[in-house]
Amino acid sequence: MWYNDKTVVATHAKNGTQMCWAVISGVPITGWIRIKPATADGVSNVCKILCLAQATGRHVDVYIPSGEIEQATLR
């Protein structure tokens, strides 16, 4: 499901591949939500969008179909 115009509260990444999480306000999942590990580039790209949104105070649209973030769009 898409959740539109949300705020990124926090982001976290580890130095291993495909290990990135975010806290997004206004979605039904509380706490850290993992970015779905499909491809390393995909995880990096979504993580960058979420980090940029957090750093600049911009909002995002996030697609979370099964408890993990699969897509994000910077507003």
Image (cartoon, grey):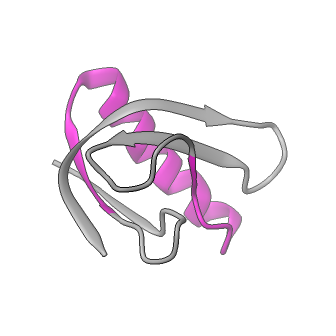
Please state if 60 lies on the left or on the right of 33 as rendered.
Answer: left
Location of residue 74 with respect to 56 vertically, above or below: below
Residue shown at 79% from the left, 53% from the top: 17
Residue found at the far right of this picture? 16
Residue 35 percent coordinates (x, y):
57, 58
Question: x, y percentage for residue 21?
Answer: 59, 45
* Residues rendered magenta in the picture: 33-62
Q: Is residue 1 left or right of residue 34?
A: left
Q: How many numbered marks, from 0 up?
A: 0
Residue 8 part of the magenta segment: no
| Residue in the image at 84% along x and 46% along y | 16
- Image point 35% across, 28% down: which residue? 54
Choose between 57 and 25: the one closer to the eye: 25
| 53 in magenta | yes
x and y percentages locating residue 59 in the rendered image = 20, 40
- The relative height of residue 54 versus residue 45 in the rendered view (above or below) is above
Residue 18 position by quadrant: bottom right
Residue 4 in the figure: left or right of residue 31? left
Q: Quadrant of the N terminus?
A: bottom left
User: Residue at horizontal 44%, vertical 54%?
Assistant: 29
Vertical side of 52 occupied by 2: above or below = below
Q: Position of residue 51 (x, y in %)?
A: 44, 34
